[in-house]
Image (cartoon, rainbow, N blue to C red):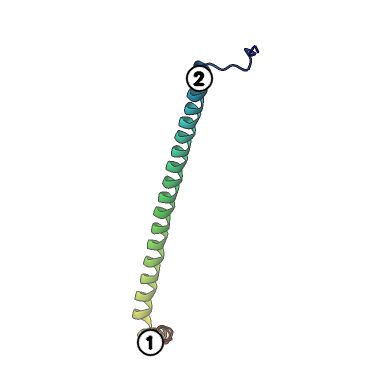
Amino acid sequence: MAQSTSNTRTASDYSRTVEDVAGKAADLAERTGEQIERTVQNFAEQGRQATEQIQVVADNFKSAVDKSVKDQPLTTLAIAAGVGFVIGALWKS
C-alpha cells in the first residue's frame, strides 16, 4: 500500500500552518486592541462634551435664579416652596 504524497503532511507543513494561524491571531488581537482604544477615546470625549454642556446649563440656571430672586423675590420663594412640596410628596410615596 503506497501512500500518496499529496496526502502526506510533514512536520514543517504543520509548523507553517501553526505559524500562519498564530500570525493571523496576533493581527486580529492588535486590530481589536486598537478598536477598543478608539472606542474608549470616543467615550471619554463624549463625557467631556457632556460635562461642558452640563456646566453651561448650570451657569444659565444659576443666572436665571439670581435674576428671579433679585427681580421677584416673593414669586421665587413661592415657586421654591411649591417645588419643595412636590419633591417631598414624591419622596414620601
| Dot 1: element | helix
Q: What's the residue at 62%, 12% (across, down)? A: 5
- Of the two numbered discs 2 and 1 in the rendering, the one whose residue sits closer to the viewer: 2
Q: Is residue 65 left or right of residue 7?
A: left
Q: CA distance from mark 2 to mark 1?
A: 78 Å
Residue 88: percent from left, percent from top: 39, 85
Question: Label 2: few (<14), some or many (≥20) within 10 Å?
Answer: few
> Which image quadrant: the N terminus?
top right
Along the viewing direction, whichever of 86 and 91 lies nearer the viewer: 91
> Which image quadrant: the C terminus?
bottom left
Q: Is residue 35 above or below residue 2?
A: below
Q: Which residue is mark 2?
A: 16
Q: Is residue 16 left or right of residue 82?
A: right
Upstream in sequence: badge 2 or badge 1: 2
Along the viewing direction, whichever of 40 and 64 lies nearer the viewer: 40
Q: Quadrant of residue 66?
A: bottom left
Residue lying furthest front = 1
Q: Is residue 27 above or below residue 64?
A: above
Give the number of the disc on residue 3: none
Residue 83: percent from left, percent from top: 41, 83
Q: What's the residue at 51%, 21% (across, down)? A: 14
Count of marks placed on residues: 2
Label 1 amino acid?
A: Ala
Residue 47: percent from left, percent from top: 41, 54
Q: Which residue is mark 1?
A: 81
Residue 38: percent from left, percent from top: 45, 42
Along the viewing direction, whichever of 23 and 40 lies nearer the viewer: 23
Q: Is residue 58 above or below residue 26?
A: below
Label 2 amino acid?
A: Arg
Q: Quadrant of residue 70?
A: bottom left
Q: Is residue 46 above or below residue 86?
A: above
Q: What's the residue at 48%, 30% (across, down)? A: 27
